[in-house]
Amino acid sequence: MLQERQKWTSPGENLKNGDLVLIKDEALPRCLWRIGLVEKAKADQKGFVRSARIKTSSGTCERLISKLCLLKNVEALEAS
């Protein structure tokens, strides 16, 4: 191959419990996306996280990780 694909050539970091995420919603503009905290990351048989239960100010919801954007691990924020 002359050009190497940059995306999906190496595994990325899995979501973990306690991660702070943006919840993407196609019906809303980017400046109005909700922020949530990962309560439970759900992995498949290979150990890759595919979906997560998210706690928001309006309750909890379950989303695929393709609809989430990782901001920061809350435990790392508290440590610094």
Image (cartoon, grey):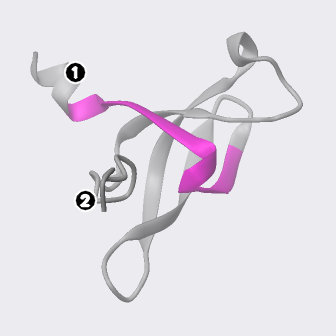
Q: Give the range drawn in magenta.
A: 60-75
Foreground mark, 1 or 2? 2
Rendered-image quadrant of the N terminus: bottom left
State the mark number for residue 10.
2
Q: Name the residue under label 1.
A: 77
For the residue carrying disc 2, how many other residues have a C-alpha within 10 Å: few (<14), some (14-19), or many (20+)?
few
Rendered-image quadrant of the C terminus: top left
For the residue carrying disc 1, how many other residues have a C-alpha within 10 Å: few (<14), some (14-19), or many (20+)?
few
The local secondary structure at tag 2 comes to: loop
Question: Is 73 positioned to the left or the right of 25 in the image?
Answer: left
- Position of residue 74 measured from the top left corner of the image (x, y, whole percent): 29, 30
Give the farthest residue toward the left.
80
- Position of residue 55 measured from the top left corner of the image (x, y, whole percent): 58, 42
Q: Name which residue lies at 32% across and 85% down.
A: 46
How many angstroms separate mark 1 from mark 2 (CA)? 26 Å
- Amino acid, disc 2: Ser
Magenta stretch: dominant SS?
Answer: strand
